[in-house]
Amino acid sequence: MYRIGGIEAGGTKFVCVVANQAHEILAETVVPTTTPAETFGAALRFFREQGGVQALGIASFGPLVLDPEAPGYGTIGRTPKAGWTGADLLGTFQAGLGVPTVLDTDVNGAGLAEARLGAGQGLDVMAYLTVGTGVGGGLIIDGRPVHGLTHPEMGHVRVHRHPLDGDFAGVCPFHGDCLEGMAAGPSVMKRLGHPLSEAAPDHPIWTILGDYIGQFCTTLTLVASPRRIVLGGGVMGNTALFPLVRSACAKGLANYVPHPKLAATATDYIVPPGLGDRAGAIGALLLAEGAMRTG
Ligand code: ZN
């Protein structure tokens, strides 16, 4: 019987699933992210109790070392999350379950899922960006997430300060006022003391965030020419942001790139996810299928 495993490895929880060929979930468990030893141990126990899997995909928070030639391949890079720098995700699960295993970033996993089964189906070049606790993105070309030397770190591209945003310094510990520093959930908490969903509809924060995220969509359009940009994550769950992002993206392009899909009023270029909050787990399963093909 065809059984594949997936782990959506997040900073607060590991969602572990076993599925069949149709991506129907046969078993699922949620393991809190505590220490690598505890969390990995509980996840391994779950897969063993299910009778094992034929391949495993892991879509994880990062940064990750994804270059097979690099020292520490398959581990978590320098992360502010205590105890997790250097945690050997790939090695632990590959050895622990003895099956082909593929590791990728959480956003590449979610992007892959959106490209194959969600809002980016049938598109040869698409981008997925999540704006939530952090900001991250993946570029999916011909059904595969783009890697290279490391993996994209789209959340840390700089943005121009919005005039209504005063001297807000941003919250990224590395760059201060990069996109993540200015537009992720913690930046909203720092400015307002509450999440975006509780902001009044006429509060300037909507325009400010829409502008920053739109600026990044302009950059993404100019750099990668995706056919569609899928915006997910908790902040984008406030769907009133979409028209503001579209408008800011079009303003940044200033009619330089001639395509009707890029107009401020076009609604099928910058879109919400098609898979909701299941994209991460489904992405991990798709990574497992890739492992089976190559492993
Ligand atoms: Zn940054």
Image (spheres, rainbow, N blue to C red):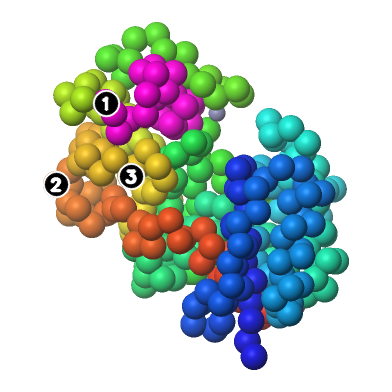
Q: CA distance from mark 2 to mark 3?
A: 20 Å
Q: Identify the residue at image location x=78%, y=49%.
A: 38
Where residue 192 appears, as percent x and y from the top left, is: 36, 18
Q: Is residue 290 above or below residue 153?
A: below
Q: Identify the residue at image location x=41%, y=13%.
A: 168
Q: Which image quarter: residue 8?
A: bottom right
**Outermost residue toward the top?**
167
**Viewer-side residue, 140 vs 283:** 283
Q: Is residue 4 above or below residue 101?
A: below
Where residue 126 appears, as percent x and y from the top left, is: 40, 59
Q: Are marks 2 and 3 in contact (CB under 8 Å)?
A: no
Q: Identify the residue at image location x=42%, y=45%.
A: 233
- Judging by the rendered image, the residue that carries numbered circle 1 is 199
Q: Which residues are magenta?
A: 178-199
Q: Is 41 situated left or right of 149 in this image?
A: right
Q: Identify the residue at image location x=63%, y=87%.
A: 2
- Judging by the rendered image, the residue that carries numbered circle 3 is 237
Q: Which callout, 2 or 3, points at the residue further toward the start of the chain? A: 3
Q: CA distance from mark 1 to mark 2?
A: 25 Å
Check residue 265 in the rendering and tell me which mark sits there, or answer none.
Answer: 2
What SS does tag 2 mark? loop
- Residue 183 inside the magenta-drawn segment: yes
